Image (cartoon, rainbow, N blue to C red):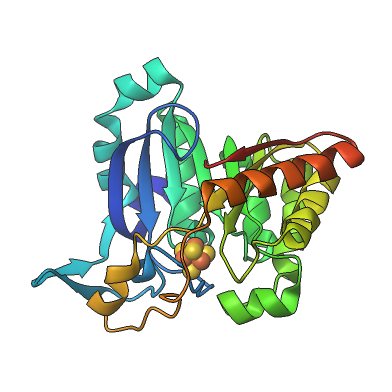
Amino acid sequence: MENIYDQKGRIFDIQRFSIHDGPGIRTIVFLKGCYLRCRWCCNPESQEYKIQELTMNGVTKTVGQDITVRELMEELEKDRMYYQRSGGGITLSGGEAMAQPDFAEALLRACHNYGFSTAIETTAFADREVVARLIPHIDHIMMDIKHMDSVKHEAFTGQPNEKILDNARYIAEHASHLVIRVPVVPGFNDTPAEITAIARFAESLPNVHELHLLPYHRLGQDKYEGIGREYTLSHITPPTAAHMQMLKETAERESQRLTCHLRVQIGG
Ligand code: SF4
């Protein structure tokens, strides 16, 4: 790689002072572009790599900007004190950070050069070569497993799940810390049988001790109209607290039935 600080990438947001996307206080860098098209996606403006316009409440803004790692590090440096005091750092999110592998690798390496802890939120729908390149530079991986049935996975996300499940096993074997997260979406994966299957898979992964169940929400719904798309899940409602608790207990029972490795929680 040439000078990593000259590497350019495309992002659509930077969010400071986040406490839900990895340990401690973190700055989240949202990379543009994703291979999936999850129907519940709360960042639909993240999916296309191309720079777009988003109109909300009569205001139109440009979504997406090209930036060098050097420029980004200047921004990330501002909160160094908070990372240090809280055990936080930098999280790459998206979109799918693995869809911009050169930029993601350069940024992760730069973060480590600066002494910042690194994390990624990913679906790991990426070539193995990309996954293997990035893992050594990531301290915490939060990976989505959305469904164990590939046909249903493809129907709701636009892609089958085999590559994801293969990569999950590889990541579990090679990463320093992997958390499995499940977006719980009514009508897609919110039955005890579906959550049991995911818990069984997570339980089978070496070095995985946490399973996070993330209830579906509608926070991104208005953005679909804002980029000229239809939101196709307006007929469903978020799962109730009681339903999430039942699913949590279901996953815990499956874990206990097997090797009892998993700590299951609702939310990230
Ligand atoms: S993987 Fe994430 S960013 Fe990509 S479409 Fe699905 S929810 Fe959206």
Above or below 223: residue 67: above
Hey, which residue is sitting farthest right in the picture? Answer: 258
Q: Quadrant of residue 46?
A: bottom left
Q: How many marks?
A: 0
Q: Where residue 130 appears, x then y in whole percent?
A: 62, 59
- Residues 33 and 42: in front is 42
Location of residue 123 with respect to 50 vertically, above or below: above
- Residue 228 located left or right of residue 93: left
Q: Nearer the viewer, residue 231 or 246?
A: 246
Q: Residue at x 32, y 25 (%)?
A: 80
Nearer the observer, 70 or 119: 119
Q: Is residue 213 visible?
A: no
Name the residue: 49% across, 36% down.
22
Determine whether, in the image, residue 207 is placed left or right of residue 64: right
**Whole-percent x, y for residue 54 in the image:** 21, 72
User: What residue do we see at 29% from left, 48% from top?
Assistant: 14
Q: Tell me which corner region of the image, top left, top right, bottom left or bottom right, holds residue 167.
A: bottom right
Q: Can residue 29 be seen by looking at this rendering?
A: yes
Percent of width and height locating residue 209: 73, 35
Residue farthest along the left direction in this orientation? 58
Q: Residue furthest front?
A: 242
Q: Residue at x 62, y 38 (%)?
A: 265
Residue 228: horizontal and vertical position, in percent? 27, 84
